[in-house]
Structure formats: C-alpha cells, structure tokens
Amino acid sequence: MGLTLEINTGDLQKASELLQGIKLRVQDIREAGPAIRLLIQEDVDLRFQSSPATETGGEVLGGENWEALSNEYLLARPIRRNGQILRDTGELLQSMTAAGNPYEVFEVTETELVFGTALAKASRLQRDRPFLFWHPALLEKVAAYVAGYLGG
C-alpha cells in the first residue's frame, strides 16, 4: 500500500487567486467600511439603550461605568430626574447613528476607519462617561466580519 498525492494545477491557480484577492482586500478596507460602521452604530445604540438612571449611574454595554448625575445638576435641571444618562435629547446618539446627521463623523480610507461625532459637547461627555470605545464583544463582531470579508 502506498500513498498518492495528486496536485491539480487548476486547484493551485484557484488558491493563488483567492490569496491574491485576500491580499488586495487587506490592503484596502474601503469596501468593508460601511459594514463595520453598522456594527459600531449598533453597539453605540445598544449602549445608549442600556444607559443607567440619572440618579444612580451604573454599567453600560461594554463594561464602562457611567457615574450618576450630580445632585447640583439634577436640582438645576429637574426634568433630568428619573431619566437615563446621556439620553435627554437624543442629539448625541443621533449624531452617530442617524443617516445624514450633520454631526456624524465617518471616514474610511484604504487603511483607516474613523467613526464618531462632531458635536462640540461630545469630547467632554466622552471624558466624563465614555460612550464610544472598543470592548471584547464589539471586537469579536468586527473581527468576525473582517475575517469573512478577507476570506472572500
């Protein structure tokens, strides 16, 4: 008994073409950008849905802790009582998730994807209560998409 290995040049050519396609897709992520954007938008939307109460604060999707709003703030703005943190007007969330929002930031080049918001108050809010960040579940979703994208 022996072992025979046959090499079909047609199969090698297909494998070579597949690898070349993967190489080209790795060099330019522009086509993958819109789908990755949707994954990030979904994550942001779910984070805001899990926003804790203004009086207690708490953990949001992804593991960040949002501190309760201060008593001084709640006294000055009683309408914020019994609400959710960062959900008073919807402006911040919509600036990242609503199509065509003038404050939306989304750019994708061959090698970089930028996602965020151009709202003036966003950097202060991000510092105090991070609303846009990578976490293991989001990384897994994006990695799974990219692996499928690269695989053709």
Image (cartoon, helix red, strand yellow):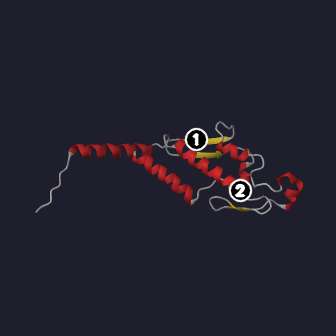
Q: Which numbered tag is attached to residue 23?
A: none
Callout 1 amino acid: Glu
The N terminus is located in which quarter?
A: bottom left
Q: Residue furthest left?
A: 1
Q: Which residue is mark 2?
A: 51
Q: Nearer the viewer, mark 1 or mark 2?
A: 2
Q: Residues within 10 Å of mark 2 (few under 14, many from 20)?
A: many
Residue drawn at the location 72% of the way across and 46% of the way down: 92
Residue drawn at the location 64% of the way across and 52% of the way down: 46
Q: Position of residue 123 (x, y in %)?
A: 71, 51
The C terminus is located in which quarter?
A: top left
The mark nearer the N terminus, 1 or 2, is: 2
- The quadrant in which residue 82 appears is bottom right
Q: Position of residue 89 (x, y in %)?
A: 77, 46
63 sits left or right of 111 in the view: right
As measured in the structure, the alpha-carbon distance from the residue carrying label 1 to the one carrying label 2 is 27 Å
Q: Which numbered tag is attached to residue 107?
A: 1
Secondary structure under badge 1?
strand
Residue drawn at the location 21% of the way across and 44% of the way down: 9
The residue nearer to you, when weighing 95 against 42, is 42
Q: Is residue 113 visible?
A: no
134 sits left or right of 81 in the view: left
- Image vertical order of residue 35 relative to residue 3, above or below: above
Secondary structure under badge 2?
loop
Residue drawn at the location 40% of the way across and 43% of the way down: 24
108 sits left or right of 78 in the view: left
Q: Position of residue 145 (x, y in %)?
A: 48, 49
Callout 2 amino acid: Ser
- The quadrant in which residue 133 appears is bottom right
Q: Is residue 7 visible?
A: yes
